[in-house]
Amino acid sequence: MNPSVPARRGGLLLAASLAAGAAPVASMLYGVLSLAAGLLTVAAAWLTKSVLDNLGSGAGMSALLAPALGLTVVGAVAALLPHVCRYLSAEVDRRTALRADAQLFTKAAGFPGLSRFEDPAFLDRLQLARQGGGRVPAQVMDATLGLARSAITVTGFLGSLLVLNPVLTILVAAAGVPTLCAEIALSRRRAGVAWRVGAMERREWFYGGLLADAEAAKEVRLFAIGGFLRDRMLAERRTANAARRAVDRREVAVQSGLGLLASLMTGGSLLWAVRGTYRGELTAGDVTLLVAAIAGTQSAFAALAHEAARASESLLIFSHYRYVIEAPPDLVLAPDPRPLPALRRGIELRDVWFRYSERHPWVLRGVNLTIPHGSSLALVGLNGSGKTTLVKLLCRFYDPTQGAILWDGVDLREVDPAELRDRITAVFQDFVQYDLTAAENIALGDLGALDDEEQIVSAARRAGAHDTVKELPKGYQTPLTRTFFMEEDRDDPESGVLLSGGQSQRLALARAFLRGTRDLMILDEPSARLDAEAEYEIHTSIARHRRGRTSVLISHRMGSLRNADVIVVLSDGRVVERGDHARLLAVGGEYARLFAIQATGYLPDDAGPSEGAALTEVSP
């Protein structure tokens, strides 16, 4: 959490390049005007000294006119600069935030695998990057310019003091060093707290989200767990607040001490100035310059310390953005990917072993199987047997830890993951219903069909979703959300609709059907939320759609898999049985046992599992 100097320098260069690339003209103007502002107070002090000294010496109007006009110009510029700089800063901030967010989410969407999104530490960094990435680059630039502006002011005033009293100059400069060091130390502590409480805040948002989530509302109320979730949420907030409170208390103590030191320095300097004036060693202009220089130096040192601390804190927060932006791909990508041939022979898993990390147990253990082209393969097994993990490997969301997966003899690690996935269509058991219109929910399966109503409706018909969608308030243009409304629905916010789980699953199937004749179709529990009649209709439609195509099916409902060409039984990450439905029943192994357990639910109460195993026509 304490990046090295080169790392911070790299963050500064990245932030500067973001700002300069997003708003080159505004950034340049803002920089020039910000630095010019650092000279104004010094110039005003010297011009004031000149006016007072000329008045004291009885100089004529011509001698007074030039510094007086100079003060007028400096005052006018000083009055205008803050407003212009504020506008330029806001413009740079807006454009930089847009560019930074575009880069961040392009990077996040560009990770070819899933491992980053199943890593809590990375998700914490991503959350902090989302919070700070958009605004922090502009803050880094603003703080850096503020640092340079304050440094110019400090240099100017110390030079002025040097003319009057070298010893006093050294004392004032020395008094500013503790302020600078303390502010930087406090900024690092604040950034460290932001990192530590990041995980707490994610948990707090999780609990708060459950309390405000429509899908969770039923269970929250039925099980009366609202108080439990609220207490968990508030406990995370209290822990985060305590960490921040400790930093705030330290900040109060340190800054109070530094403020007292500055007051003593100012008081001592004033006493010296009074003594010098009484002895005739200083003029009225000298005293005015001295007072302005001391006050200005202390103020500029405080600003310098504040901007240095702000820059340091911003760079530390920005390090999370850099971490995400500079993170390498979570899959090893081939430098010269091989073209993926059209599937003609089949897919082979050759001695595939897999675990999510060295700290995790093996999920797959030496899996060998072939999915012949044009055939359907069903995966059967208890929860945790490795079925869904095998699907993740087929989609190349992960690579095998050992072994290989071959597509017509080509190792999937040698091809572009995007090209592979363009050959696959799928319905996952944890499918998503997007807060978009019904048509858009379907069209996400193939964005090329986004404006092709005919294709969208055809896919919906095959998934059995058309009748439901056409009855919605705006048909296919109905938003499937009550979370927010589309801009065009601002005058009719009641148009949004929430679908049932089964209806949403039909849309997910339509999304998969829209992808048309892809080489491989994966169906992971495609009918888990459907009633018996709907399940029969969907599996009939799926059977028609996958006829002659390569497909992988996963379901805990054994009857829906019985017509697969090959059924593979997984247990503890290994293939323990394979064959068609009839052969596996005849063997009387794990498949027959699982089938019989489900079959007993369709038999009279006095029938046992053995009778169920003999029934090969049991419905799911």
Image (spheres, rainbow, N blue to C red):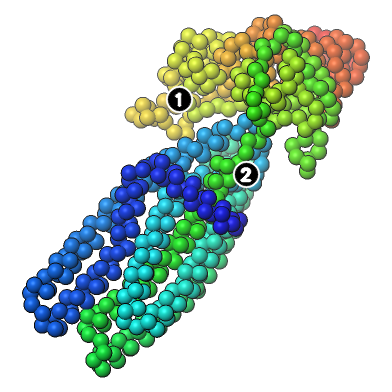
Which of 376/350 is in front?
350
Dot 1 corresponds to which residue? 479
Query: Which comes before the other along the chain, label 1 or label 2?
Result: 2
Residue 471 seen by the camera: no
Please state, as top left, top right, bottom left or bottom right, where the N terminus lies in the image. bottom right
Q: Which quarter of the picture shows residue 112?
A: top right
Please state, as top left, top right, bottom left or bottom right, where the C terminus lies in the image. top right
Which of 208/72 is in front?
72
Q: Which quarter of the picture shows residue 209?
A: top right
Across and down, in percent, residue 478 comes to 44, 22
Which of 150/359 is in front?
150
What type is the residue that disc 1 sits on? Answer: Pro
Residue lying furthest left in this view? 61
Crowd around label 2: few <14 · some 14–19 · many ≥20 (10 Å): some
Residue 307, compared with residue 542, is above or below; it is below
Dot 2 corresponds to which residue? 122
